Image: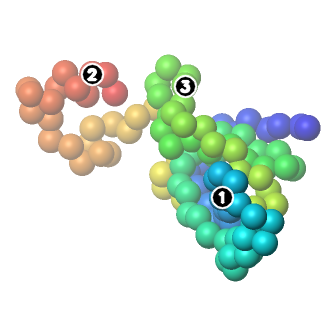
Amino acid sequence: MSKKTIKPYPFVSVTWIDSSSRYGWVSLDEADGDLLDGFDHIKTVGFLIAQAKDGIVIANSIGGLGNCDAPMAIPACAIQLMTYHPELDYKGNPPAEEERGLTVTPRHEALLVRL
């Protein structure tokens, strides 16, 4: 499968249909009952890390060290809608303080150095 890594990482919201299951042993008559009555429509938001014909990978956070938190693959067949939110894209550089609308106090200055 050909995978395309996306940079800068666009922020997206994805509506997709989740699978349904039961745990444990059930009779065959019970197994097909209400599982087909309706599937959950899930809305997930995050940064689009990779995209391929078969699906996408999104992460809920991107770190400054070339890492990400909780990458999740969603198969293309489950995706109902994907919306881009370009104002929230991760471009690799944190915005300047004045762009973030922050007032920096000495107490918070050490935290901003890490950003």
In the rendered image, residue 52, in percent from the top left (x then y), is placed at 82, 45
Q: Residue furthest bottom?
A: 37
Q: Residue at x 31, y 22 (%)?
A: 114
Q: Secondary structure at mark 1?
A: loop
Residue 113 image label: 2
Q: Would you name the residue on which mark 1 appears?
A: 22
Q: Nearer the viewer, mark 3 or mark 2?
A: 3
Q: Would you name the residue on which mark 3 appears?
A: 67
In the rendered image, residue 23, in percent from the top left (x then y), is placed at 64, 53
- 48 or 22, nearer to the observer: 22
In the rendered image, residue 78, in percent from the top left (x then y), is placed at 75, 62
Pick whichever of labels 1 and 3 is earlier in the sequence: 1
- Local crowd at mark 2 within 10 Å, few (<14), some, or many (≥20)? few
Q: Residue at x 27, y 22 (%)?
A: 113
| Amino acid type for the residue under numbered disc 2 | Val
| Amino acid type for the residue under numbered disc 1 | Arg
Separation of residues labelled 2 and 1 (CA atoms): 48 Å
Query: Does 78 sit above or below residue 88?
Result: below
Q: Residue at x 62, y 69 (%)?
A: 40
